[in-house]
Amino acid sequence: MDPSEANSYGRAFIMRLIGILLLAAAAYVVAHVAVVNEQINWHAFADMKGSGEVTFKNLDSVDWYLGTDRAEPVMKVLRDRNAQIVEANTRLRADINQLRAAFAQAAMLAGFESQVREGKYTDAFGSLQSVSTSLTQQARATLNTAAIGDRLFELQRLADLQRATLEDLTPPSAQLFFWTKPSLSMLEVLCWALFGVLTNLIYNSAFYVSKRSFDPNERHVAYTKLVYGPILAMVLVLAIMFGWFDLGPYKARVWTLPLIAFIFGYFSRRTAMLFDKLQDKIFGEAEKSIDEGPARILKLHMENLERLRAATAPVTFTGVIERAKAIALNEIAIASANGVKS
């Protein structure tokens, strides 16, 4: 084919690719406007008691949405402050016991104690003031109600600090532009992988047109990239998320998935080679498992179950007996899988 004619095909092909890219980008923006991103905050990772003590629900989510390097110092501050809150509450309970002993009617302190348990320390201070009026000056000095009031204010201060520190576990809004829900994050991956494929095709096509060496037959190869590029990118991103491999120091987090997808899409051929290497490993392990038979699979499964049972180790004699029965049944199941008769 005449180079001039081939270049005219190349220019038309480039314009078509640019049109597809602009259309895909417009659809992407419209989708982001229509589907509001789920706002991730510290409530997704932690619970805070009324007393101000903080417990974490899912450490994997903390690492996925924030990263360990950022979350670790914040979590250490929360942990240390938890210890201060527990110590202050222990002293306060001792003070309340002394206060209760000074009253013939325990009901007079019921509201105050309830407010303390709920972490309503400011309200509890008001109740303490009301209770103190029924005491003589000597009794107030003996029970040191002023010190109890100071302890209540200290606990309120610590709880407020915990709440403020927890806000540091909310990912920055700049990182939450992309969809973060699992199902929608996969859509992000597909979109950005497609953007990567299109960008690569436009760049290379323009390069060959400028060199007057564009081959119209390569257009069919380009169209196949638009299909397999995003699909392979999504599969490899899923493999990263499930821990089958990683990117070393280039940590994969929820906000970096679009960037990773774009790179996988842009270098579609290298992505296909990476996928081939991954499937070689998978099929190698599958063949090894078939050769070894089901006994190894069952053994690994039983070991995992044993680890979970160990986490709930029995503390009574009946529990020990039930544990022994479970171990015996496991051994029988493994022996059966190996073809050994009991």
Image: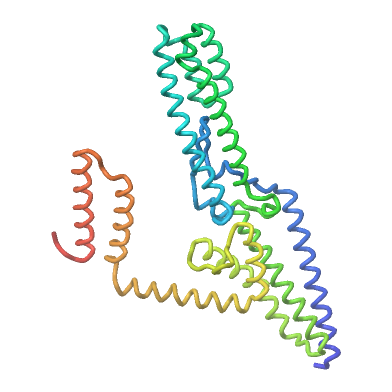
- Height in image: 166 above or below 243? above
Horizontally, residue 291 falls left or right of residue 130, namely: left
- The residue lying toward the viewer, choosing from 106 and 291, is 106
- Residue 250 spot, x, y in % from top left: 59, 67
- Give the position of the C terminus as an image quadrant: bottom left
- Give the position of the N terminus as an image quadrant: bottom right
Rendered image quadrant of residue 237? bottom right
- Height in image: 41 above or below 331? above
- Height in image: 195 above or below 208? above
- Residue 69 spot, x, y in % from top left: 56, 56
- Residue 201 spot, x, y in % from top left: 73, 77
- Residue 175 spot, x, y in % from top left: 67, 54
| Residue beneath the point at 81% across and 85% down | 209
Rendered image quadrant of residue 314? top left
Residue situated furthest left in the rendering: 342
| Residue beneath the point at 64% across and 63% down | 190
Horizontally, residue 110 falls left or right of residue 211, namely: left
Rendered image quadrant of residue 8? bottom right
- The residue lying toward the viewer, choosing from 256 and 26, is 256
- Height in image: 266 above or below 207? above
Horizontally, residue 187 falls left or right of residue 120, namely: right
- The residue lying toward the viewer, choosing from 33 and 305, is 305
| Residue beneath the point at 73% across and 72% down | 198
Residue situated furthest bottom in the rendering: 2
